[in-house]
Image (cartoon, rainbow, N blue to C red):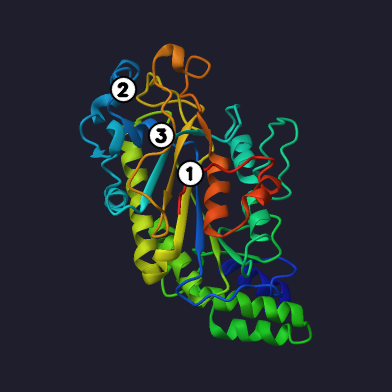
Amino acid sequence: MNRRDLLKLFGGSLVVMQSPQLLISSANATSYSKTEQPLFIWVMLRGALDSLHTVIPEFDENYIKHRPKLAKQLGTGLPLEKGFSLNPALAELHSWYQNSELLPIVAVGSGYHGRSHFDGQDFLESGQSKVNSNAIDTHSGWLGRTLQMSAYHRKAIAIDQTVPISLRGSDDVNAWYPSNAKDVGDDIYSALMNMYQDSPKLSMSLQKGLELQKNAMAQQSGKQRTKFANLTKACANLLLADNKLSCAVLELGGWDTHNNQHGRLARQLKELDDGLASLKAQLGERWQHTVVAVATEFGRTVKENGTGGSDHGSAACMLLAGGAIKGGRILGDWPGLAKSELFEGRDLMPTSNSLQWLATVLAQHWQIKPAHMPALFGGLQTYSEQLV
């Protein structure tokens, strides 16, 4: 087998992306015990989650007028405060709400008002706060920039095949993702180590990749590895294995429900619920010092369409969860669903900014001075609400 074949085989078995300064430690890092370091986990829901189907405004009489078919879920939700309910597929998250570990925020928007998935996701992940449809700056992301300002070692892992935009700008980021390819034998790795023996940088990258694979979920095989619950479990394992890791990023697609939304979202939300339950269970005592932020690029139309779905909209909801969150309540101002109260006459009106909520929770959780946050979030200020 030649060098190219070895590299191809290795690449099919293990995905590891590293920044050039991956192994450089922070001289100013604050020391935390293994169970005390505050963890932050960002979950991106790609495809535009319908917030009205997730955090349901049971009290709004206009809901059924806009959604006569989708409104069949009314009365089946899990009760929250202020007349809202949680989709019944989110049973685990509802138990977190009851234990003050879940904080839904309604009617949020990033400041992007277009309807392109790609631009909306790029804008949310970059966190630049100013809309320029011709040039969304994706060279760095809000989370990568914030990591550089954290009070302790700045190290992150993305459960993805590449480093996402949100983590760009940090000097210390890994990306890991399982492969469906047949596992490579130890002899192949030994051959690679021999091949790389004269290149300390390549040898170090290979060794780091092998450690990631071992710490994550190497014992599982095939398609089972890429189920969201298994990815969150792997994410937790990686965080537990390396006390210098303070942050992780996950994503879950499949939220573009233009048709048959009721059944599709029930399955999607159940997968999200199961995955987050797996994350909490695997983190164990570290959960008490964890914040999980779940958001999507934008919401969906208030009015249902003719195929039992909804189309691209504006405001959505976001979820803050974790043992560190002061949950058990609903945040965000409800704008109403009357025709005159809708954004452009069709969408839920954004009343607060999802990026400002992210800035607020990070400033509090990572003890970053609020005065520093505008520079990291495109000029946006933090909110006064205590979240952690």
- Which residue: 73% across, 82% down? 196
Q: Say which quarter of the image contains residue 74.
A: top left
Residue under label 3: 51
Residue farthest top in this picture: 340
Residue under label 2: 60
How far from the left and from the top, in percent, is residue 69? 28, 22
Contact, mark 1 vs mark 2 (Cβ under 8 Å): no
How many residues crowd mark 2 within 10 Å: few (<14), some (14–19), many (20+)? Answer: some
Q: For numbered disc 2, what is the local secondary structure? A: loop
User: In the figure, 342 relative to 257: above or below?
Assistant: above
Instruction: Give the label, 1 or 2, closer to the camera.
Output: 1
Residue under label 1: 385
Contact, mark 2 vs mark 3 (Cβ under 8 Å): no
How far from the left and from the top, in percent, is residue 200? 76, 83
**Which quadrant, please, contains the C terminus?**
bottom left
* Distance of label 1 from label 2 (alpha carbons): 25 Å
